[in-house]
Every structure is written in structure tokens, then in C-alpha cells.
Image: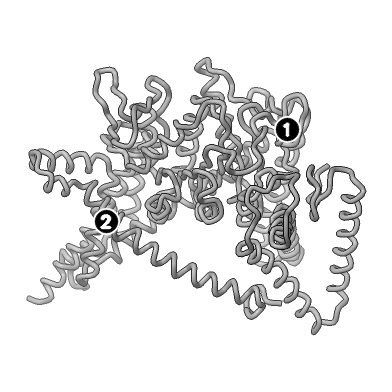
Amino acid sequence: MNLILQSKVPNFWAQPFNSQGLWMGVIGGLIVGILLFLGLMFMPAQFRRPVVTFCTFIGGAYWVLLYIFPAPIDLQKTEMPTGPVESIGKWLTDANPVVVSISGTVTAFMLGLGIFSLLSIHLKRISRRQKDWVYSVVLLVSLVSMTFFGYADYISRQGPEGTKLDLQANWGLVNYGRDLLFDGLLQQMDAAMFSVIAFYILSAAYRAFRIRSVEATILLSTALLVILSLMGAVAFIWNGSVQHLANGNDFLLNFQLTEIAGWIRRTFETSSLRGIAFGVGIGALAMGLRIWLSLERTGGGA
Amino acid sequence: MQPQKSLGEKLQSLPKQVLYLILIVLTSVPLFFPVKVPNEPLESSIDLYASLMAVKPGETVLLASDWTNSTRGESLGQFNSVMRILMRHNVNVVLYSTGDAQAPRVAQDAIAKLNQERMATGKPEYKRWENFVSVGFFPNGEATVNGMGTSVRASFNGKKDFAPGRGLTDVYESPILKGREKVSDFPLLIVVTGSKTSNITVERLSGKVPIAFAVTGVMGPETGNFYQSQQIVGFASGLKGLYDLEGLMEDGVNTPDKSGNVVVKSSKYGPIPGFPGEKNDGQGRAYYPTLHFAVGLLILAVIIGNVGMFLSRAGGRK
């Protein structure tokens, strides 16, 4: 049994396996969770927002504090912190695995929510014989069969001999079923969908990439050089020709295709991408602050 | 009767079906004729190979497999090459994923196929539990990778894998994870990804463990940022990176071949051996010529479109 509040070395957040403190924590957490859940369900709508705002702030505050608060350096597992700063730092660090586990568990709940949503929409569509209801049947059959074979395959690997199923020679019906549905169908269709992009890129490049200005000319020639440098055969011929013409002249060797493309990458490409990344980072920080302080009303707002 | 189109207009209005047909032919036919294309590996690819080869036999590395078959053209080949190097070098692997729920299964299937390849050549099986463990998928990548920065053990708490003769067992009972509590206890973290998980890894774990990437061609430019700032030790980008890696596995670095020629030279490293005579070619060798044709067609299409535009303009001015 593994619980998120469990640790071999006890701390504020975790207790040893099967200890009284662990069970107290588990039962206490469960009760608080149920009360919170019921409280939110039956709470008048106007009071829900402050509760959600408070929980969001506490959740965000943990990560902010973990990042900015000084953490004890090289504190051994059995060592006690000295002073309030080190104690708070240790308390925050010890909480990290628990918070990460809770965060992962909550995120995993979205999977269940997604399945519930899919089932409710498509079962309704099938029962009412709405337009294209046959596709809903296909979706649900796919969902159920993939779940069945996936889970049966997982169960078949549970026993002591489970590792033998890593070799195809030892497979049974459910393992072949899982392989057919997952590798044979889902993954191939996934790859096929992705490969369609090649047609769009070609069509768009042919119709839209026109040299109508100086900027477009610079863009096109730069792109051409970088793309050509990725073609080993072209780079080999270009570089070979330059080396032959240069005849030991170091300056002329700078005109090798890989050198030109490398210079473009190192100077223009990375610096411009870094600029974009900074912009995105600042935007994300602003948005993060708005969500943390519940100023953001759209999307996940309560 | 409609006025006849000028040459410029004709060049600008090629039917897309024709373009698509040419693309299909040009990308399909070369697949049947895999040829060795001359190539000079990028410095970032050499650094990736050198980092993988620098891991001592018997050590354990973290391998984030965050790709599925949607990017398998690049990612599967990269994963196979990375795994082949680690397997041949007797390095153990802890496999985890934060990118996609399908990713652990896809990676395990790839390892199973590599194992069949090994066993067909008389090599020992790369055993689950003894050589690699699959920790599985973590739904909240940001928090998980952040948690790994504090304690890998705590982040992997409760995760199980199949132990021979015991069934599902806590991964930390595997011998390959013994004594590895923090991320700094691992000599290398490799991320094979088709998504943004590489960025998260750098943001959260940079400076705590040497990090290397194998990313798709689309992600190459932004990954170059991390490489230039030395936040990662090396990376392979897209098909070119994969072809580099396969070539390095064959030729090594600063290592003479049978005829005494050093194929790949690097002033940064001493001799790093390759694995000549073994199966080093994979998707890189198979797809790299195709990339030439596809990119060639793309360039040709842009040229035709622009020539058509200039001809039309010139005709209009007359």
C-alpha cells in the first residue's frame, strides 16, 4: 500500500508505513475532503467564489514560497533544522512530494471527467438518433474495446510471470488484441494524421511564399540556407566546393554552407527566439499572477 | 471563351493534386532505396553522443520518453538510437513520462523490439527490473519534474513495475534505483520528446543534473537556446540529428575506421569509439534521403511560384 502521506523518515507531512500518525492523517484528510466537497455542493452560490479564491491563493502561495524562501542546504534526513528560517524552509521542502502527489491526483481526475463528458454527450446523441450518431457509436465502441483490451493486457502482466509478456512469443489473445488496437490502429492513425501536415506545408509554401519585399527576400534566402544545410548531400557538395576554391584561405572557409547556417542559428535564430521566449515568459507571469490572485474571470474563473 | 493563361499565371496555379502526387511519389520511392548520404554531424549531436558514451557501464540514467507515434518519424528513431547506445554500453535506464499517457507503452514496445533485435544476434536480453524500470506516466508534468528537483524518490513514491517472480513491485526495490534519492545521484537525464516537456525539464532541473535532449526538427531552434547557454549538454534535432547519431554510432568520434581514416573529428573530445559492424542504421538512414527529396520539392515549389509571379508582373507591365 502506498499513500501520499507516507515516508520512511517522518516529517510534518508524512509518517512511517502503518503508523498511527499516518492513519490519523489519512482519515483526517478524508474527512476534511468530504466536508469540503459537501460544503461546496450545498453552499449558496455567492459564497463559493471566496472559498475557491482562498484555495487558489493557498495553492499558488505554496509554489511561490517554495521558490523564494531559502531552503536548508545539505540538511541530512535525520538532522533537525536550527532556527525558524531553516524550519520553515524544511517544512516547505518536505511538503513538496505531498503537494506534487495531490496535484497529480487532481490532474488525473480530469481523465475521469473527460470520459464522463464523452459518455454523456455521445450516449445522448445515440439515444436521440441525432445527425451522425453512427460516429458516436464508433467512438464509444473504440473507447470500450480499447479500455477492455488495455486493462486485460495490464492484468495479464500482473502475475510473477508478467515480465515474460515483454516478448511477443509469450502473448495471449488479450495481448494481441491490445497490440492490434493500440499499435496497429490508434498509433498508425495518429501518425497518419500528423503526416497530412506535409501536404499543407507544401501547398502553403507554393501559394503564399512570395518575394514581394526586401524583408521577404531576406527571410526566404535565410530559410533557404538553413534548410539546405540540413541536407547532408547538398552541404557535402557545397562545403567541398568552397574548400577546393579556398585552397587553405581561412576567410573563404567561412562561406561553407554549414558555417553560414551555423552563424545564422547562433546569432539571429537563438537571439530572436530568446526574445520571443522572454515575451512569452513575462506574459505567463502576468497571467499566473492574475489567476493566483483570482483577478482572471475567463477560463478557470469561479 | 476564357482568355488563355499566360506562362506566369500557369506557373502560379499548378493544381494542388499534382503537387500532392509528386510529394507522395518523392517521399515514398526513396524509402525503398536507403542509401548512405554524405553527412557532417552537428556539434550538438556529437555532444549528445559523447554524453551518452561518458556514462559508466552499470550506472543508471533517467530517460523521459515523452513521444508517441505521432512524431515517430523522428522520435522513434532517436529513442532507438539512444537505447541502443545505452544497452550496448550496459547502462541501466529509469523510464518515465510526463508528456502523454500513451508514451510509456509506446516506449516499452520499442524496447521489446530492440530486445528481439539483440537476442537475434545472440546478445543477452536487456531485462526489465534488472536493466530498466518503467515508472509510468505522471499527469502533472510541471509539478512532477519540479518535485524531482527536490527528491526523485518522493516523486516516484508508490510507482510500481513488474519484477520477475514477484509481479508488481515498488520501483525503488529495483537494484538499479538503489541509493539514488536525488536527481543529482543520476549521471545523466535524457529527454526524448515531441512536446514541450523539454522546456519544463530545463526550467526545473537545470544545474541539478546533466541534461541531454532528442527533439523533433520543429523544436530544434528553441532547444538550440538551451544548448547555447549550456543548460543542456547536447541534443539531437529531428531527422538530421537522428542521422548524425546513427553515423556517430558507426564511426565514433576521432576514431579511425578500418582504412585508418577518421570520419568524425572533434577538437573537444578524445577518441570515442563507435559500434562498427553492429546494427546502427535505422530510421535515420531510411528517411534521410526522403527528407532531401521533400525539402527539394518544397524549394522548387517556392521557386516556381515566385518565377510565375515575376513573369506575370513583367507581362502586366508590357
- Classify residue A50 by image quadrant: bottom right
* Residue A232's disc number: none
The amino acid marked with disc number 1 is: Glu
- Alpha-carbon span between mark 1 and mark 2: 49 Å
Residue A281 lies left or right of residue B101; in this view the side is left
Residue at point 49%, 67% (across, down)? A281
Residue at point 80%, 44% (across, down)? A2
Residue B182's x, y, as percent?
A: 63, 43
- Classify residue B271 by image quadrant: top left
Nearest the eye: B14 or A151: A151
Q: Which residue is mark 2?
A: A264
Residue B40's x, y, as percent?
A: 28, 38
The amino acid marked with disc number 2 is: Ile
Residue B237 lies left or right of residue B148; in this view the side is left
In this rendering, the answer to whether A184 lies above or below A139 is: above
- Classify residue A291 by image quadrant: bottom right
Residue B64's x, y, as percent?
A: 56, 44
In this rendering, the answer to whether B83 lies above or below B181 is: above
Q: Residues within 10 Å of mark 1 (few under 14, many from 20)?
A: few
Residue at point 23%, 70% (across, down)? A215
Nearest the eye: A115 or A248: A248
Q: Chain of mark 1?
A: B
Q: Same chain, marks 1 and 2?
A: no
Residue A100 visible at all: no
Residue A9's x, y, as percent?
A: 78, 44
Q: Secondary structure at mark 2?
A: helix
Q: Which residue is mark 1?
A: B173
